[in-house]
Amino acid sequence: MCSSMPQQIANLIASPTLHPDVQGASFQNGFASPPKRGNKDIEMNDHSDSCSLATTCGRFDSPRSTIDDHDATDDDMTFCMANYAKEALKMMFMMRSHGMLTDVVLEVKKELFPAHKVVLSAASPYFKAMFTGGLKESEMSRVQLQGVCPTAMSRLLYFMYTGSIRVTEVTVCQLLPAATMFQVPNVIDACCAFLERQLDPTNAIGIANFAEQHGCVDLQKKANHFIERHFTQVCQEEEFLQLSAYQLIALIRRDELNVQEEREVYNAVLKWVKYDEDNRHSKMEHILGAVRCQFLTPNFLKEQMKNCDVLRKVPACREYLAKIFKDLTLHKCPGVKERTPNTTRMIFVAGGFFRHSLDILEAYNVDDKTWTTLPNLRIPRSGLGAAFLKGKFYAVGGRNNNIGSSYDSDWVDRYSAISETWRPCAPMSVPRHRVGVAVMDEFMYAVGGSAGMEYHNTVEYYDPDQDRWTLVQPMHAKRLGVGVVVVNRLLYAIGGFDGVERLASVECYHPENNEWSFLPPLKIGRSGAGVAAINQYIYVVGGFDGTRQLATVERYDTDTKTWDMVASIQIARSALSLTPLDGKLYAIGGFDGNNFLSIVEVYDPRTNTWEEGTPLNSGRSGHASAVIYQPSCVSTSMDYEEGEVYRRDGNTDGGPSDSSQDPCSTKGPSFCGSSSNMQFHSSFESSGCFNCETEAFQNTEKPNYNTRDCLDYLYEGKWKASLKTVQRRAQPTWHDDNGNTSGQHSLSDVDSNKTAQPVILPITSLQLLNPAPKESFKTRRRCIILNALMHSHVRNVVQNVILSTINWRRLKTIYDI
């Protein structure tokens, strides 16, 4: 990494004396400025390598020269010597290398480093204070330094004389403390930038602790940000299991943890306790208070209280969970706020109608205020429902209404934001057009709707783990275009059309006793309204009353069970969608009686006002929307969808993948604990890595590679490669001279016929990837040398990890070596 250090030092050593050839030139910013002729600057450029003269030089911030230019005339010239600092420092570096004019020797653990005090003082406030502050070291020709290693001192001195520093995984743990000690901010920034690029679930906690120890606030924030965003991967790593109870509580208390459900936090805590159960089970009571157990489901709590061995040892925890279970079944307000994941939040809008049913899927980024088109639905549909459940976006039911074809659908499809693909799910028991959809207790409920002229009062829920629909007690009334919402584990069905009239009635479903009950009705009967909840309030926006589209908005207080009116939307409409996000409501699209609308209005309940938001790309009605939080996925290769395993022959196996094939289980170099003696593996032969931006080999034909072939392609840059380290829990797999697997052996089975030797480091597998085009993903390079369990003629493999965005998802094949 290069720096402006040569310029800083040059400012101290630049002499104000002018060469006779440039007498009369005035100095600006420490450099001569050219004369003006006819109010025009004249540029003069010397063509030698050692000097470059120009009229403008804004790179130096030294004070104005004291040379008096009051006699300056129009014939004066100003010179900017761009290469002067670089050449001066190059000469000083040469002089130091030959021991010329050095005036101090730094002794570091019996190693001697001759240097120039002026260069040290210019580069480091520490040395400036030492040599100019009247300390005894200012008179000494030999200074002994403590708390720094010779390697770090050597690299720091090289930087002070050249402005260039090379940071590796080995040296960063030495360089950063030394740069902090000697107050060399450029090197500190270089180390922090390097560590930021190394952030990985395996080392993020260690890097955060390391940054905190050395006062690197920005790096610490970025590491914590990474931990929050990738918590589901971080909690699987050794660093997480080695946290203290205090550190664990501080982590899981954060609002920003990116988890799809609170169960993930609870399971992480349980895993932490079981890692050292004898010493940690007594701390479970205090830790459990930091988990937001109020957002766990009653069924999950009941199962834990019945079967969890840790809870049996801590009766206070069982009592705590029993109280929460009681409050949940009584539908009390949770009393704690939901987490706000530290990740991209988006509103997905699916399907709709504009002259015909649409297959559009669009996403609104609330941070950028932009709409993005995503892969289309599998079939066009309008009047569908949508929900976000366990990291997937679901499109439910609807009607495919096109010229010459119109039918209602029982289809259910789910969309993965990671793989950007749609997959079918188990269909509903009946087709449902203009269905209401909501999520409760990690189940997705489909309410009402119609199949042709048959209007439904039936209700069913979908279990994503079982891929199965189950019918529950039907509503009292049939409802088409019903609004559905969940508050405090109660499912509300509001308004709708029963085939005769627009309904004002409201029903509430109690999951404990599987019953529906009536609540106070709406002030105005309506169907096709947007319905959503914020805190204990349910909002009903717009709709159709049988004669006209409505602009009125009603609000229901679930605590007092009363309705009141709030500010109306600007444009009356029906068949819109209403989505809550960040304490605001987004009313999207709809039909105003004449036109299909693209307008988006945003309601702020604090001010009781609507304002116009970013419109849809095109008008539509009868669409569905839901908020998603971008799932966390950190991998060194492509994302796997639904545990699908890609085999060498290109076939897939629908079974669950093991840890060696799960990209999110990737192991990498780790900062263990918070010790400052953290070790990284050095870069290959101290020459860095090959250019990760090299064009990939375009031939898609896959020959039968052996180890040498793979490395040849790797070094030639014809393939992008990713090394995924896998922490084997079983015995290691051995390979014979031909690279064939010879079965499982214990360490004592090693004999002379085996060309590989057991090593303590994790086993490594090389994955050859056919990457997506450069413009479709952002890459980040991490180069590591690892000892691998492989043929004896290959003991080091260069690891190139490309961490990509969700757009890069085209895994072709995996070759294990």
Image (cartoon, grey):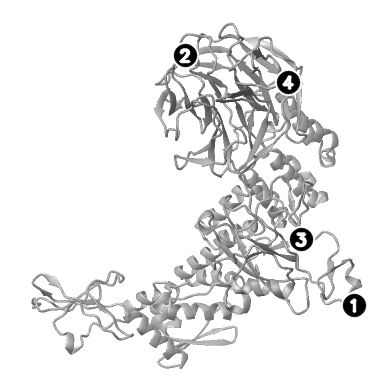
Query: Residue at position x 38%, y 77% from top?
Result: 6
**Tag 3–tag 1 contact (CB < 8 Å):** no
Q: Secondary structure at mark 3?
A: loop
Q: Which mark is residue 7?
A: none
Q: Amino acid at mark 4?
A: Pro
Query: Between marks 2 and 3, how big is the CA–CA gap?
Result: 60 Å
Q: Which residue is mark 1?
A: 751
Q: Which mark is residue 511?
A: 4
Position above or below: 697 against 273: below
Q: Is residue 671 visible?
A: no
Q: Secondary structure at mark 4?
A: loop
**Tag 1–tag 2 contact (CB < 8 Å):** no
Q: Earlier in the sequence, mark 2 or mark 4?
A: 4
Query: Residue at position x 61%, y 25% from top?
Result: 398
Image quarter of residue 666: bottom right
Q: Which residue is mark 2?
A: 565
Q: Earlier in the sequence, mark 4 or mark 3?
A: 4
Question: Is 279 placed left or right of 681 in the picture?
Answer: right
Q: Which mark is residue 727?
A: 3
The residue nearer to you, when weighing 181 against 398, is 398
Q: Earlier in the sequence, mark 1 or mark 2?
A: 2
